[in-house]
């Protein structure tokens, strides 16, 4: 009998928690109104949306009016970057953007378009070998015409945490809007937008036990913004389009859940994560931890292996019943290593062999032990195959 | 025993996978995403390689799900471009007519994909080719013979002649002992949703027009006009660029015909040194001796003596009898009993002893 595969890819997505499903249920069936309609059906939906917005605002330390619902984390990043940069430029504030080479593609590609199509000037901050940005480098990069700084809170590929609070404080002092992609964080870290000094913060519900297809943008009141999407007056014109009420309710229920669970889970999983990291480094030759050893997400372990094809390794582990990831979209048939790993100075022959193992609330010690039991053999098998030249 | 099946969403590879599952193997399906020319079709959809269009990926995934096997689609566009398309273009630029399937089987399927299979802990790589492998136990260990598929109409051993002992030791061709009709029947019996899929045709990476327009778009420098000579050395026309012609071709030659040229004219030779096309009559067409470079012998060894055998000079050609004469420098000559009308430089010449593939090389 084959046992069920073990899921160790929580940075990709998480299961929807039963209490989240329960909260969403009525809005997938009987409560179907459009929250913009003025009649009874609409009012019922609007009330649910108000409540969801208030819940999210409360957990994040924001005001309800500062919460915008959208369709995913990528959209949230897009709205923030394009919305703020274009509004700032329209006000004549300049056209300079500061970001990092380790951002998620949602930020990276949007900034690239703002540069290539919209003519913005972009400064890429350097990162150290752990993928961290020096807040002082932000200070030095700021110019009178800087209109936006975007630095992610926790890296999806290597789990490294950035000094967002300090960077936020520098930007606030300089009067420059600061956005952070916090998509990987809510299930593990407390997020308070006031403490973080952020003007915009992006979340995605499915990364914290909520449904897919729901993004959240926190946008601080008074931040210059023009909606990159055009249409009706939904979300006070900041994100036109009929709001996904069930999704918004699900996101709120999920954030409430993780706010309750995360401290205890983070403590438990950090121990398991460290056991995993120690086990991998001890049992697999030619292995390195990628990302910061301590300033990293408590559930996140990522490695690079010398002379290992990362994609083959993921497939070999899948065949053995473990769902894990390389952490990037790299593929051995189109061998371009992850730009994030290269930016951290990881050599190409290591960067092609990346592995990301991300634990979740349901992960047990025996899952980790079983994984550690199988991994060295899989790595050896992939390495051996690469030695054969046909 | 674990087997990786190269799946394409087509009926042959789907039945191959189903047969292996039925035989009790631990089967894993892999589909390679191969390069196709960029561009969009009339409805604005981006072109994809014919072997791995989105619908084909969905079909393969559906088959894998039905069979309960893991399935991966792997991007190999850059590899395919480099190992297959670039080589193919380079061969045309040298005024030869290459067959890209050789490089694909050699470097992509039984190179890259076989390596992937071993990395997955597989013992074999299976494909949906109509061919067979036979293991023969001998004193020196096991030898592997590459045999024609049982369906003479569908036999694909020609494009597999590039495989050697190491590849064949790991190769399985589960549909090779069936006819196409039987394979379609098996697909229906297994309940595979791909039983009625049409045959794939033509070069998989061409998305618009034929290979000539592809070459014009990608290597415009090959479209270099030059003289057309008859066998007496008289210029009787102008060609559009050598890669657009193949030996034996009759149509598309714009030549002056005089009284003594009332007979139809055929391409006899391409002469890249003078960028010239040599044409002549049907009677002048035909060569008895083929020169073949880079001979590859399936056994790993050339025959010690000239070998009386059959040869096939393109995928759909009939076999012709003659003598294979291996040379010490790795080339060979093949002396046909009767002249061959369309010996085309760049195509493969593959030798057979009965059903067995002896080996092959590239006609020069």
Image: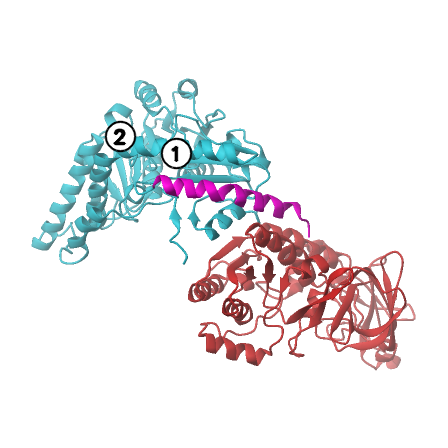
Chain colours: A cyan, B red
Most extreme residue toward the left, as rendered?
A40
Q: Which residues are magenta?
A: A364-390
Circle 1 residue: A273
Distance from disc 2 to disc 1, alpha carbons, whole Å, reads: 22 Å
Output the chain of dot 2.
A
Of the 4 image quadrants, the one containing the C terminus of chain B is bottom right
A91 is higher (above) or lower (below) than A364: above
Element under label 2?
loop
Dot 2: few (<14), some (14–19), or many (≥20) neighbours within 10 Å?
some
B53 is higher (above) or lower (below) than A100: below
Who's the residue at 89% across and 57% down the image? B328
Q: Are marks 2 and 1 on the same chain?
A: yes
Q: Which residue is mark 2?
A: A191
Query: Badge 1 local density, few (<14 within 10 Å), some, or many (20+)?
Result: many
Helix or strand or loop: what does disc 1 sit on? helix
Vertically, is B231 above or below A182? below
Q: Nearer the viewer, residue B212 or B309?
A: B309
Judge by depth and name the residue closer to the eye, A267 or A310.
A267
In the rendered structure, the answer to whether residue B122 lies left or right of residue A239 reads right
Query: Can residue B225 be seen from the camera position used here?
Result: yes
């Amino acid at each position: 009998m084959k046992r069920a595969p073990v899921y160790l890819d929580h940075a990709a997505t998480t299961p929807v928690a039963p209490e989240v499903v329960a909260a969403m249920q009525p809005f997938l069936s009987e409560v179907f109104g459009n929250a913009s309609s003025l009649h009874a059906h609409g009012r019922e939906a609007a009330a649910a949306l108000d409540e969801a917005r208030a819940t999210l605002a409360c957990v994040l330390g924001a005001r309800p009016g500062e919460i915008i619902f959208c369709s995913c984390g990528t959209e949230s990043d897009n709205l923030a970057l394009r919305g703020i940069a274009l509004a700032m430029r329209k006000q004549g504030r300049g056209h300079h953007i500061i970001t990092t080479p380790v951002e998620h593609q949602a930020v990276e590609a949007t900034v690239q378009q703002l540069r290539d199509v919209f003519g913005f000037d972009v400064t890429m901050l350097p990162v150290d070998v752990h993928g961290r940005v020096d807040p002082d480098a932000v200070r030095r990069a700021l110019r009178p015409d800087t209109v936006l700084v975007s630095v992610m809170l926790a890296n999806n590929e290597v789990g490294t945490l950035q000094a967002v609070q300090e960077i936020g404080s520098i930007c606030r002092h300089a009067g420059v809007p600061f956005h952070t992609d916090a998509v990987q964080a809510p299930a593990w870290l407390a997020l308070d937008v006031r403490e973080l000094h952020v003007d915009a913060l992006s979340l995605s519900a499915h990364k914290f036990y909520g449904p897919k297809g729901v993004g959240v943008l926190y946008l601080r009141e008074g931040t210059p913004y023009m909606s990159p999407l055009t249409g009706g007056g939904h979300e006070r014109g900041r994100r036109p389009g009929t709001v996904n009420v069930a999704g918004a309710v699900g996101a709120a229920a999920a954030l409430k859940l993780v706010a309750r669970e995360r401290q205890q889970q983070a403590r438990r999983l950090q121990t398991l994560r460290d056991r995993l990291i120690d086990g991998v480094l001890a049992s697999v030759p030619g292995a390195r931890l990628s990302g910061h050893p301590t300033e990293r997400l408590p559930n996140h372990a990522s490695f690079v292996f010398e002379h290992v094809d990362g994609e083959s390794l993921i497939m070999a582990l899948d065949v053995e019943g473990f769902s894990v990831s390389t952490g990037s979209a790299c593929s051995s048939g189109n061998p371009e290593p992850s730009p994030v790993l290269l930016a951290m100075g990881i050599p190409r022959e290591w960067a092609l062999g990346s592995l990301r193992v991300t634990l979740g609330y349901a992960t047990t010690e025996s899952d980790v032990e079983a994984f550690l039991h199988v991994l060295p053999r899989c790595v050896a098998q992939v390495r051996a195959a690469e030695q054969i030249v046909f | 025993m674990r087997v990786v099946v190269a799946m394409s969403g087509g009926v042959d590879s789907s039945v191959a996978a189903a047969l292996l599952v039925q035989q009790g193997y631990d089967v894993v399906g892999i589909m390679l995403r191969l390069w196709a020319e960029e561009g969009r079709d009339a409805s604005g959809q981006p072109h994809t390689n014919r072997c791995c269009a989105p619908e084909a990926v969905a079909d393969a995934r559906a088959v894998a799900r039905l069979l309960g096997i893991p399935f991966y689609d792997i991007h190999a566009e850059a590899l395919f471009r480099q190992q297959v398309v670039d080589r193919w273009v380079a061969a045309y630029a040298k005024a030869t007519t290459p067959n890209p399937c050789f490089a694909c089987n050699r470097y992509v399927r039984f190179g890259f994909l076989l390596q992937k299979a071993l990395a997955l802990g597989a013992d074999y790589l299976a494909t949906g080719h109509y061919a067979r492998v036979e293991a023969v136990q001998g004193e020196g260990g096991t030898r592997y013979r590459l045999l024609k598929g049982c369906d003479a109409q569908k036999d694909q051993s020609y494009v597999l002649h590039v495989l050697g002992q190491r590849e064949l030791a790991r190769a399985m061709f589960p549909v090779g002992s069936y006819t196409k009709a039987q394979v379609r029947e098996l697909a229906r019996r297994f309940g595979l949703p791909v039983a009625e899929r049409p045959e794939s045709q033509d070069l998989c990476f061409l998305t618009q027009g034929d290979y000539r327009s592809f070459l014009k778009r990608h290597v415009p420098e090959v479209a270099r006009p030059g003289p057309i000579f008859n066998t007496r050395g008289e210029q009787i026309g102008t060609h559009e660029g050598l890669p657009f012609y193949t030996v034996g071709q009759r149509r598309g030659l714009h030549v002056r015909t005089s009284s003594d040229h009332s007979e139809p004219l055929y391409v006899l030779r391409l002469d890249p040194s003078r960028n010239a096309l040599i044409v002549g009559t049907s009677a002048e067409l035909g060569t008895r001796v083929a020169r073949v470079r880079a001979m590859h012998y399936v056994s790993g060894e050339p025959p010690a003596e000239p070998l009386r055998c059959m040869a096939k000079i393109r995928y759909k050609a009939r076999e012709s009898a003659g003598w294979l004469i291996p040379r010490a420098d790795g080339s060979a000559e093949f002396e046909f009993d009767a002249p061959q009308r369309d010996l085309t430089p760049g195509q493969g010449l593959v030798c057979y002893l009965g059903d067995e593939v002896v080996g092959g090389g590239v006609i020069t």
